[in-house]
Every structure is written in C-alpha cells, then in structure tokens.
Amino acid sequence: MDMIIIEFIIHIMNLQEAKLIGIESFWSFTKRRLSQFNGLSEKTFYLHFKESEFRFNNRSNNLYNMILKELRQNKL
C-alpha cells in the first residue's frame, strides 16, 4: 500500500513540474513577443497579452489559415 502512495506522490510532483515548465515557456514566449514593442499602453496591454496567449496556444498551427477560415465563416 505504501508503494502506491509513493507512486501517486511522484506522479503529482511530475504533473506540477510539467505545469511549471509550461508556465515558464509561455512567459518566456510572451516576454520575447512584448519586448518587440517600445513600451505598451496600459489600455492595450491586456489585448497584447491575450494575443500572445492565442499565438502561444496555436504556435504549431498556421495562423494565417486559421484567421482566414474564421473571417470566411463570420463575415465582418
């Protein structure tokens, strides 16, 4: 029984480490992206941050095709 508990604790620790790596990866990506601007307005920071989130979550996808598909489905 003790071995199952130890394996469970190790599993939880590995999950927490993976989450930290993911957060550090996102933050590194976002800092690189936002540093391209020469300062950001407090009013637009949230929008830049959300764009970074979108780009990070879709970094393996072709953003041009995604946006084009979205625009075709939901005309302006």
Image (cartoon, grey):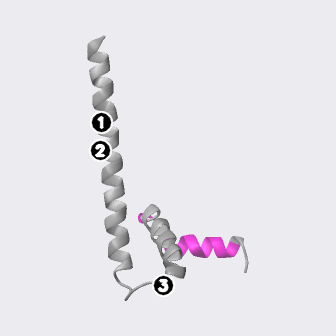
The residue segment tinted magenta is 59-72
* Magenta-drawn stretch contains 64: yes
Please indicate, yes or no, whether residue 20 appears anywhere in the rendered image: yes
Say few, some or many: other residues with alpha carbon within 10 Å of mark 3 (under 14 / 14 to 19 / 20 or more). Answer: few
Looking at the image, is 19 positioned above or below residue 48?
A: above
* Quadrant of the image containing the N terminus: top left
Mark 3, residue position? 41
58 with respect to 36 (left or right): right
* Magenta-drawn stretch contains 43: no
Q: CA distance from mark 3 to mark 1?
A: 39 Å
Q: Residue at x 37, y 76 (%)?
A: 33
Say few, some or many: other residues with alpha carbon within 10 Å of mark 1 (under 14 / 14 to 19 / 20 or more). Answer: few
Furthest-right residue in this view: 75
- Pinpoint residue 10: horizontal percent, then vertical percent: 27, 30
Instruction: Say what secondary structure mark 3 lies in.
Output: loop
Mark 2, residue position? 17
Dominant SS of magenta comes to helix
Looking at the image, is 10 positioned above or below residue 25?
A: above
Q: Quadrant of residue 4?
A: top left
Mark 1, residue position? 13
Looking at the image, is 24 positioned above or below residue 66?
A: above
